[in-house]
Amino acid sequence: MGLLKEGPQTVDTIDQYFGGELTPRQIRRLIDALELIGFDRKEFESTGRANKKTWHIKSSPYERNTQRLLRGVLPRVFSIKRQELVEKLVGKLDVAIDSSHFYETEAHRKLDENLEIIATAIDSSRKLKINNISGDSTSIGNSINFPIDVLPISIRYHRGCFYLVSVLHEKVQPSVVTFQVDQLSLTITDKSFERQDYVELVESALKYRFGISQNIDGEVYDIRLRFSSTTGEFVKNQFWHDEMNTPQRNGDGWIIEFQCGINRELVGWLFQWMSNVKVLAPPKLVDLYNEQLDLMLKLRGHTDDDPLEYTNRFAPQV
């Protein structure tokens, strides 16, 4: 927070900093919490009004740098749309440590409003009505007809975007569905549900997705890939999936294996490595990868004016 600096602070100055919204008891609890996480607290009686406490809160260089790093990696929606509040919590942004914001969703009003709606629905365990969606970043295909009620379980930040992780429970078997937050038109309903009843279901479903997108089916596959030496050196040191095995040297390259479902996000991820990766298994992934290669090669025969038709061969089959 911005008041973690060299200099005494009183209940009154801290209260003023937070706009008069905290009680003295809440402020003292805040000071206690800061002490628990390692800040140096020196408390003494001030002159003047009796029993008026003053605190000198001192952070270490490691703690100050951690604070700077946190500011630097904040998504644009926080550093732009919520800048004033962020600066109250973690101080002013530091240009020495910043983010490229590459791949992030633009910090527009729709995103900020929807985050508020979803967070409120999660906190109050109330269903959301999704009236419509623009785009299909999570590959839901035509499996869902809008409007539809969903059970909001969490918000997940992934590859520069915020996603609603929800449960669709219109059928006998509930299913986990994800949506990009800024693509939704939604409202909170007055229908309640027991959120905790679905947390385990959601964690289990997401465990076997590559990223956030819907899997094409309910199977878990043994994915086996061969990477070139230089690319493999990079890929093996990044986090890609919870079920990723220890990368193994294979001649002048690397074998990387993990267990997950197959989805559009996985195939798209493979293509970013261009000719530096080969899909070894399973056969279904090999076929889907080669199919996309063939479709892209066909574009070589198109003129610049030929329209591109949206295709999604990875929509859920179940």
Image (cartoon, grey):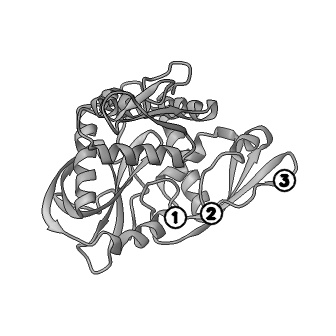
Q: Is the Cβ of the residue at disc 2 closer than 8 Å to that at disc 1?
A: yes
Tell me the element at label 3: loop
Label 3 Cα crowd, 10 Å radius (few <14 / some 14-19 / many 20+): few
- The label on residue 207 is 1
Marks 2 and 1, how far apart in space?
8 Å
Whole-percent x and y of residue 149? 19, 63
**Residue 171 located left or right of residue 55:** left
Residue 270 shows up from this direction: yes
Label 1 or label 3, whichever lies nearer to me, is: 1
Q: Nearer the viewer, residue 168 or 24?
A: 24
Q: Amino acid at mark 1?
A: Lys
Q: Which residue is mark 3?
A: 250
- Viewer-nearest residue: 304 or 48: 48
**In the rendered view, would you say 242 is above or below 275?**
below
Viewport quadrant of the N terminus: top left
In the rendered image, the residue lying farthest to the top is 95
Reading the image, the residue beneath label 2 is 243
x then y, percent, for residue 90? 43, 32
Going by the numbered disc 3, the residue's amino acid type is: Asn
Badge 1 local density, few (<14 within 10 Å), some, or many (20+)? Answer: some
The quadrant of the image that shows the C terminus is bottom left
Q: Secondary structure at mark 2?
A: loop
Along the horizontal axis of the image, is 12 left or right of 56? left
The secondary structure type at the circle numbered 1 is helix
Mark 2 vs 1, N-terminal side: 1
Task: Name the residue nearer the viewer: 224 or 310.
Answer: 224
